[in-house]
Image (cartoon, rainbow, N blue to C red):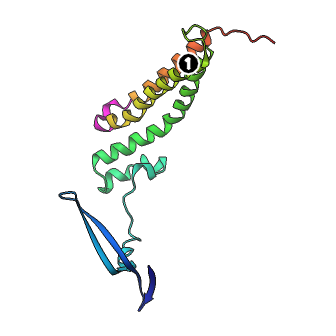
Amino acid sequence: AELIQAENVNKVILKNGNRQVIDKKNSQLSIIKFDEYEVNLDLLFKNINEERIKEPEEMFLNELWDNKHKISGRYDPRQISSMIVEGHKRIIDPIYCIIFTLISLTFLLSDKLVLKSAVKKIPIIIFVIFLIEVIYLSLPNFIVKKFSLLPIMYIFPLSLFFLLIIYNLKKTYKKFKK
């Protein structure tokens, strides 16, 4: 490839290569072989200064809950509810870190489980955390579709958190011998 600037136009000249294009209508791949191919970079970057619509994952918390999105007309109702759910998800995320730690400690320090060895308990811990993670990742998608389920986003992790805390406070642990 060769980068050229001529007459205030930025170009890249590619030599002896191919270009692959997928037709979106029928998913057909076309391969175009060329000896020399010229790409005008100015045309590629001409709209770079225009403001684009941000995804919820790119926004700050105050942007997610800003009412100007409803008024502006740039976002449809589903995108707006997705922004609100993303904001609530960011608030509840740290609780899941604590829940995963509590689950690990609960299983590892438990002497009432059938499996006495920590090595045998680890797959159980991983499986339980995996199930909770699946629920955690799928819950926002359900809530965006049915926004009235938003309280479940808080009820599920907080109830898990308090159940684990209560269970661990009532439990007596083996004393370590010195």
Is residue 141 visible to us here?
A: yes
Q: Is residue 52 left or right of residue 110?
A: left
Position in image of residue 42 (x %, y %): 39, 79
* Label 1: which secondary element: helix
Which residue corresponds to the image point at 73% horizontal and 9% vertical from the top-left? 175
Does 99 sit above or below residue 35? above
Q: Main secondary structure of the magenta part?
A: helix
Which residue corresponds to the image point at 29% horizontal and 45% vertical from the top-left? 78
Position in image of residue 76 (x %, y %): 28, 50
Does 102 sit above or below residue 113? below
Position in image of residue 50 (x %, y %): 38, 69
Please state the extent of the stretch shown in magenta in the rendering: 144-151
Which residue corresponds to the image point at 41% horizontal and 92% vertical from the top-left? 7
Q: Is residue 150 magenta?
A: yes
Q: In the rendered image, which quarter is residue 152 located in?
A: top left
Q: Nearer the viewer, residue 37 or 84?
A: 37
Does 105 sit above or below residue 134? above
Q: In the rendered image, which quarter is residue 53 located in?
A: bottom left
Q: Is residue 67 magenta?
A: no
Position in image of residue 112 (x %, y %): 57, 7
Residue type at the position of mark 1: Lys
